[in-house]
Amino acid sequence: MFKQILVPVDIAALEKGGDILRKASELLDEGGSITLLHVVEEVPAYLSIDIPVDVIDNAVDDAKDKLKQLKDELKVDAHIELRTGPASREILSAAKDHKADLIIIASHRPDLSNYLLGSTADRVVRHATCSVLVRR
């Protein structure tokens, strides 16, 4: 069904990541590819003074290890990519860079803060130029 699938995963919710990665492997065309993405949020400048320099590097390394473990556990062939920055912006950028024809993203039940600020999944759905599957 799809040739290029982007699967952004929040390392803090790996069980949801496993669910959407399995779904991606079911929807992938033969010869297609899956990109497993994690975005490490940047630390605001006003906080960076109090945080050790290697915190972001350690977060990236930890995320890479967890994504590798997840794809190996599920036996899914996927490319791992890590980016830093605002999650929704980096997900949309990765989709464009990889010419994704589908983004599969996990979401939580919306609460009041989502209606006021919007969630990452909401922003991706609103601004993506390809199909988006949101799994709750």
Image: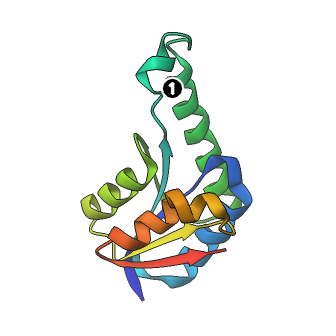
Residue 101: in sight, yes or no?
A: yes
Number of marks in picture: 1
Residue 34: in sight, yes or no?
A: no
Which percent across, then down, holds residue 97? 25, 58
Give the residue displayed 52% in from the left and 33% down from the top. Answer: 60
Give the residue displayed 63% in from the left and 47% down from the top. Answer: 11
Which percent across, then down, holds residue 36? 49, 57
- Coloration of the structure image: rainbow
Q: Residue furthest bottom?
A: 1
Which percent across, then down, holds residue 86? 41, 45
Q: Is residue 17 above or below residue 80?
A: below
Comparing 20 with 27, the one in front is 20
Comparing 106 with 123, the one in front is 123
The image quarter containing residue 46 is top left
Which percent across, then down, holds residue 88? 42, 55
Instruction: Name the residue carrying label 1.
Output: 56
Q: Is residue 125 above or below residue 72?
A: below
Q: Residue furthest right?
A: 15
